[in-house]
Amino acid sequence: MSTLAPDRKAELRRDRSPRKDRLLRGMRTPGGAVFLLLLALLAAVIVVNPSFGEPGSLIRFIGRTAPIAIAAIGQYFVIVSGEFDLSMGSVVTAQVIIAGNLIGQDDAKVLPVLLLMLVFGALIGLINGLVTTLLKIPSFIVTLGMMLALLGLVLYWTGGAATGNPADTFRQIGRGGIENIPVLEILPYPVLILLAIAGGAFWLMRRPYGRTLVAVGDNARAAALTGARVWWIRTRAFILSSLAATVAGIILVGYAGVHPSVGRGYEFTAITAVVLGGVVLGGGRGWVLSAAAGAFALEMLFTLLNFAGVASTWRDTVQGVIIVAAVAAGARTWERRRRGASSATHDKQTPIAQPPAVGTNEGGK
Amino acid sequence: MKITSRLTSTHIVYLVVLLTIIAGTILVATAGRSFFSAGNVSSILTGTSVLGFIAIGQTLVILVGSLDLSVPYVVSLSSLLAAGIMANQPANILPGVLVALAVAAVIGLINGLVVSGLKVHGFIATLGSGLIISGYLATNYKGSSGQAPLSFRLVGATGLGPVPISTLIMLACAAVVLLVLDRTRLGHSMYAVGGDINVARMSGIRTSTPIIAAHIICSVLAGMAGLLLAARLGVGSPTIGSQGGYDLLSIAAVVLGGTLLAGGKGSLVGTLGGVLIFAMIDNIMSVLQINPFLKDVVRGIVIVAAVAVYAGRRVVSRTARFDDTPQETVSTRQEVGA
């Protein structure tokens, strides 16, 4: 939007409501409400277990949740463009197994294999994207096929048992951190990676690419008519999603080690987090940081259940109730917005400047 | 091009079926066995029955524009309920079957109400209800439980010649559902609601009825699949459904059968073809003793490749919502002018 003349920009800024109004209005969308939900859950956890509120254990919680939040950010790009990525869990597993088998105890191999994993991730996304957009196959089917084929290939390669224990320098990415920080004791690397990715995603969604991505998700035909290359925009979203799964895999090697079921169900957890963040399946609506907040809300909920002494087998049930309730509430909000009932503050005509006094421009009458 | 444009997607599905049969005959012959031996045909048909039940229901749900991801858990729950109530007493077979199907119907009713009433996307609504059931199963059942009596187990084991009874029951269910789809008001409303829910409502259709009905039928058929599995195994198992991956496989079979994932267009006969393709490919790979991990690779590639065959042209054959072909715009303008 740099082409706008300076006075035009100033006009845009003047026409906006006050910051407080915009914040309040944002909090009433599903994407804003998830932050309130997150705060409420945090408060509940601290009430049940006060030691969770200490900065040290909070930062460790953020580090633990980083992989799923990163996966949710990746899934967001695909969902907001109106598609699905079901291959995410298989990509996570594949990358973990690649790291386990190729790195071994050799420190010199860490960097080349890291690069290889990123290239491999991008390639998977490229295939998903191109098959979806050029062959016009629903992405649900393409990524389902990729999920089966990729996991099968990787398990065939390793004979079904994931072996190998990558060098400690590699595992440090997931489990280590910068130590001797004043208040926090330790600043885990996953937190830094998450901050970098969240910042990058936030920036990307404000770039022309991000704006076009949302437009494509809202109405691909209209976006194509305005000159957007829909196929390439969607393909890049798939690449971003696979890269996010790759990064989640790299972090998980440090946390969970090499195991063939490490990525199982990751795609559904990521989709749940994204949807909990108020992003609408089908595309065109939602905010990227809300998707990450959705992941945190989900993990915070599990932490709460854990501290409250609920048997871990009930986790699934609670997760199910929460996502249906959250989406039902979100659907009502979006519906109200479409009817225009909640946008009263927006519709109110606030005079920007005093109307000209009668006769001032009439040449001294 | 002229021939392909006259073929419907159902025709193409059965061309793929034919192709698979030819490939299967050749491949199985190289292994020194016959594809058409009674034992092999029977094992292929047995392979179609469980997925068949679920895919029939999934077709209806996808036709109305929803999805059902809760089927694997309904399958497990129904197998556990039936086997648990029967407890090896032949007199308890009927109550066991009825309770299992009734519980499945209630789950379907709830799914349908959440999708149509609360306006939650079917993907999320059924992912949620699946998770809810999965938590219940994990909490209350530690392993397989219950016992199906011998007379009930015979349903899963006997057949008329090479055709297993279970496949016949599945085909009978398919015939009933086909009749509903093609000959009743409910079936036509399903297509209408899946095509465009707003247009359907403005045409005077109660849009929630077909959605709820589709979800109930889908869950009941998943319950039937659970009963069949209980008959085959003799016990109920809390993981039998999720191990089979029936949620995604049934959706793949439906799409393979030419039904549009967005709803409104598709056929049940095509779905049965899709299920048959899956069963035959599984059978061929078992006969050739292919590594089980490579089987998944082949399955994944077949799903994408088979859908690719007609994905491009189906988009064209779908009724356009907005005319973008120049000739048509011209002709409309002439009509307006005249």
Image (spheres, rainbow, N blue to C red):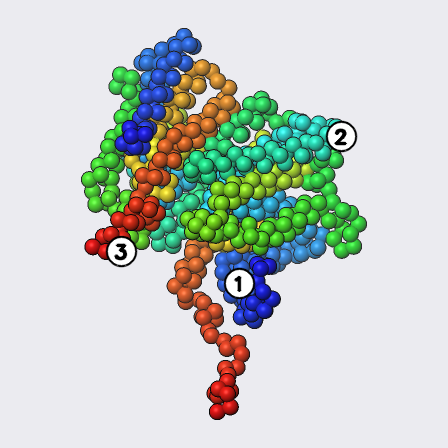
Please report the residue visible at 58 percent of the width from the left and 53 percent of the height from the top: A207
What residue sits right under mark 1 in the picture?
A27
What residue sits right under mark 2 in the picture?
A108
The crowd level at tag 1 (other Cα within 10 Å; few <14, some 14-19, many 20+) is: some
The reply, left or right, for residue B21 in relation to residue B288 is left
The crowd level at tag 3 (other Cα within 10 Å; few <14, some 14-19, many 20+) is: few
Q: What element carries label 3?
A: helix
Residue type, numbered disc 1: Met
Say which chain tag 2 marks. Answer: A
Q: What element carries label 1?
A: helix
Q: Do labels 2 and 3 share a chain?
A: no
Say which chain tag 1 marks. Answer: A
Residue A319 seen in render? no
Q: Are marks 2 and 1 on the same chain?
A: yes
What is the quadrant of residue B58 in the picture? top left
Coordinates of residue A269 in the picture (x, y in percent)? 53, 43
